[in-house]
Image (tube, rainbow, N blue to C red):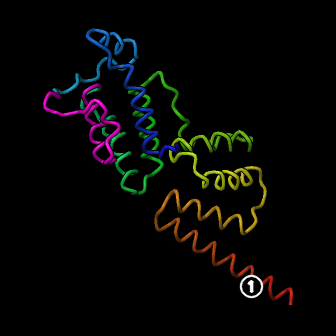
């Protein structure tokens, strides 16, 4: 059964939280061993917050995200990092566009809450990589981390790899690339980019037809 990106997100975070939810004094010992910054505030009192045992199975994704936020607050306290993660995921659930800055902020928050877990490379650091194959590999991993293993990622990465290697990209591939960008990052700019790519491709095809006559 194929899991959605949202489900995978909660599953990964839930597995990370399992480490901290032991019995009795084990929880405190685990927190000390986790390497969390010592001066973080104590968790706020959450006795009045109802969190089902299997909250991560809630069918309503927004309700599941509310439970997730409550779990994070109960474990780490009402600190900015827990809201950064929950707010970002709420926007993903609602289909709202997210920015690179927001994605990087989530990576920073996850690194603080789970310092022993490997965190993906921040977007922007890719520019330092010269090898096209290595660039494509890391770029693909980062996109999968954010969107799941969807077909649009392979389209985007293949074009970016060609550009990184200094190669040209056929117009039909660029149209597919612009479409994939729009699907993953839907906004007015990416829509306009896709529409312009379609128009340029149509003009090119028309010119080719005239040359063949």
Which residue does the image show at 48% across and 25% down from the upper left?
117
Give yes or no for residue 49 being in the magenta stretch.
yes
Q: How many marks?
A: 1
Label 1 SS: helix
User: Magenta span: helix, strand or loop, mainly?
Assistant: helix
- x, y (%) of residue 19? 39, 19
Give yes or no for residue 130 being in the magenta stretch.
no
Reply above or below: 163 against 139.
below
Instruction: Tell me which segment is drawn in magenta.
Output: 46-75
Q: Quadrant of residue 54?
A: top left
Which residue does the image show at 22% across and 25% down from the upper left?
43
Which residue does the image show at 40% across and 16% down from the upper left?
34
Q: Name, please, the residue furthest toward the bottom.
A: 213
9, 3: nearer the viewer: 3
Q: Quadrant of residue 125?
A: top right
Reply above or below: 6 against 108.
below
Which residue does the image show at 71% across and 64% down from the upper left?
173
Q: Quadrant of residue 89?
A: top left
Quickly name the residue at label 1. 206
Q: Name, please, the residue furthest toward the left.
A: 48
- x, y (%) of residue 192? 53, 71
37, 89: nearer the viewer: 89
Which corner quadrant holds the C terminus? bottom right
Reply above or below: 79 against 18.
below
- x, y (%) of residue 176? 65, 64
- x, y (%) of residue 40? 29, 23
48, 189: nearer the viewer: 48
């Amino acid at each position: 059964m194929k899991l959605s990106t949202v489900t995978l997100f909660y599953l990964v975070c839930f597995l990370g939280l399992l480490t901290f939810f032991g019995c009795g004094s084990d929880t405190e010992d685990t927190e000390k061993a986790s390497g969390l910054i010592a001066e973080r505030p104590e968790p706020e009192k959450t006795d009045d917050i109802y969190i089902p045992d299997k909250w991560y199975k809630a069918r309503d994704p927004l309700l599941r995200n509310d439970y997730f936020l409550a779990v994070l607050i109960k474990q780490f306290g009402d600190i900015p990092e827990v809201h950064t993660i929950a707010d970002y995921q709420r926007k993903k659930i609602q289909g709202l566009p997210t920015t690179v800055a927001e994605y990087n902020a989530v990576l920073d928050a996850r690194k603080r809450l789970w310092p022993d877990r490997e965190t993906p490379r921040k977007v922007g650091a890719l520019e330092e990589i010269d090898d096209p194959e290595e660039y494509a590999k890391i770029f693909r991993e980062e996109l999968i981390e954010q969107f799941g293993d969807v077909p649009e990622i392979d389209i985007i990465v293949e074009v970016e790899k060609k550009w990184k290697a200094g190669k040209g990209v056929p117009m039909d591939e660029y149209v597919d690339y612009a479409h994939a960008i729009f699907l993953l990052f839907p906004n007015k700019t990416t829509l306009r980019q896709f529409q312009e790519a379609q128009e340029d491709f149509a003009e090119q095809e028309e010119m080719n037809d005239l040359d063949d006559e």
